[in-house]
Image: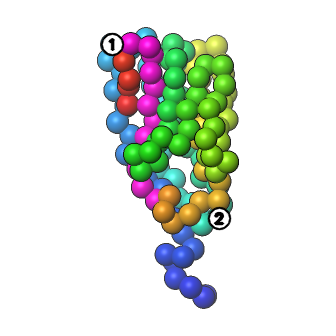
Amino acid sequence: MEGSWRDVLAVLVILAQLTVSGSSYQIIEGPRNVTALKGSEARFNCTVTHGWKLIMWALNGIVELSLTSQKPIITSNRFTSASYNSTDSFISEMIIHNVQLNDSGPVQFCAYTGERLNM
């Protein structure tokens, strides 16, 4: 096999701090760790109850994707979103396209209710 594993795999690790005290929504399930091949897609999901105003996804401390309750605010073609609504919850998904080695690092999900930022 040519090349090293370092050239083949990019590992994305989530270090999500998700506090919800005093907010009008709850995080039902936070994002999980993902391992992705270089050049492939990595998908991160977070399930919350309704009541949020703004969602932000950050990679290595930089906000790459934001969503309002009406639409996503996409700043890069490499970071897109999908969302799924049900009567009692909302699933936000951040998709990283064409994963690179420098994508390895902490991914954070943050939600804003209009009163305070919850991470």
Disc 1 target residue: 22
Q: Residue at x 56, y 85 (%)?
A: 3
Specify the quadrant that holds the C terminus: top left
> As drawn, is 116 to the left or to the right of 5?
left
Q: For the residue labelled by badge 2, is the local secondary structure a helix, a strand or a loop?
A: loop
Mark 1 Cα shell of 10 Å, populated few (<14), some (14-19), many (≥20): few
Q: Taking 18 as reference, is 51 above or below it?
A: above
Q: Taking 113 as reference, is 97 above or below it?
A: below
- Residue 90 placement: quadrant: top right
Q: Residue at x 60, y 66 (%)?
A: 38
> As drawn, is 28 to the left or to the right of 84?
left
Magenta span covers which residues? 104-115
Label ID, residue 108? none
At which x and y percent is residue 66? Answer: 55, 32
Specify the quadrant that holds the N terminus: bottom right
Q: Across the whole image, how many numbered discs are drawn on residues?
A: 2
State the residue lying farthest toward the bottom: 2
Gap in Å between the C-alphas at discs 1 and 2? 40 Å
Is residue 30 visible to us here? no
The magenta stretch spans residue 34 = no
Q: For the residue labelled by badge 1, is the local secondary structure a helix, a strand or a loop?
A: loop
At which x and y percent is residue 78? Answer: 64, 51
State the residue lying farthest toward the front: 75
At which x and y percent is residue 17? Answer: 34, 36
What colour scheme was applied to this rendering of the protein?
rainbow
Please state which amino acid type lies under the numbered disc 2.
Answer: Gly
Label ID, residue 39? 2
12 or 30: which is nearer to us? 12
Q: Residue at x 46, y 35 (%)?
A: 109
Please state which amino acid type lies under the numbered disc 1.
Answer: Gly
Lower position in the chain sequence, tag 1 or tag 2: 1
